[in-house]
Image (spheres, rainbow, N blue to C red):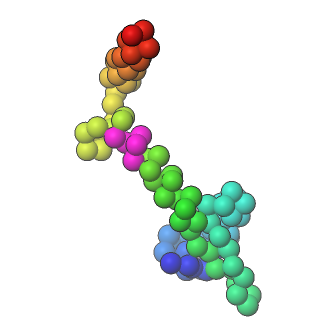
Amino acid sequence: GPRNVSEIAEALNQEQSMISHNLKPLERCRFVFSERKKRQHIYSLNKGTMEKLFQIFAHHSEKYCPTEGKCLTERDLQRRRRREASNSLYLTRQ
């Protein structure tokens, strides 16, 4: 849920200044939202954006890391790309 900078810093075991510094670009890019309460900023994730990113990560993992946690080697990746390219060429020729 929503947290202030000191709570985030404590949870991540990092300095507050570093957390504040890194939250600013995340807020500008709308990965997080900020709400001012009294003298502190309360941050929360932009769930809509994060859900879309997680879908992209999941798709990438399914495609390039088909075995639990083991990503394809460069050689396997090249083979897969050639196979996908030949399949798409075959489909477009029909």
Quarter-of-image position of residue 76 = top left
- Whole-percent x, y for residue 88 in the image: 41, 18
Residue projecting furthest to the front: 94
**Residue drawn where x is 50% and y is 78% of the image:** 1
- Whole-percent x, y for residue 72 in the image: 33, 31
**Residue drawn where x is 68% and y is 74% of the image:** 34
**Residue drawn where x is 64% and y is 79% of the image:** 42
Q: Report the predominant secondary structure element of the magenta stretch.
A: helix
Residue projecting furthest to the bottom: 38
Quadrant containing the C terminus in the rendered view: top left
In the shown orientation, is residue 33 left or right of residue 49?
A: right
Residue projecting furthest to the left: 67
**Residue drawn where x is 50% and y is 71% of the image:** 13
Question: Can the viewer see residue 59 in this picture?
Answer: yes
- 84 or 80: nearer the viewer: 84
Question: Can the viewer see residue 75 in this picture?
Answer: no
- 9 or 48: nearer the viewer: 48
Indicate whether residue 59 is drawn in magenta: yes
- 48 or 60: nearer the viewer: 48
- Whole-percent x, y for residue 80 in the image: 35, 22
Quarter-of-image position of residue 92 = top left
Q: Is residue 22 above or below residue 69?
A: below
Numbered-mark total: 0
- Magenta-highlighted residues: 58-62
In the shown orientation, is residue 6 left or right of residue 90?
A: right
- Whole-percent x, y for residue 87 in the image: 36, 16
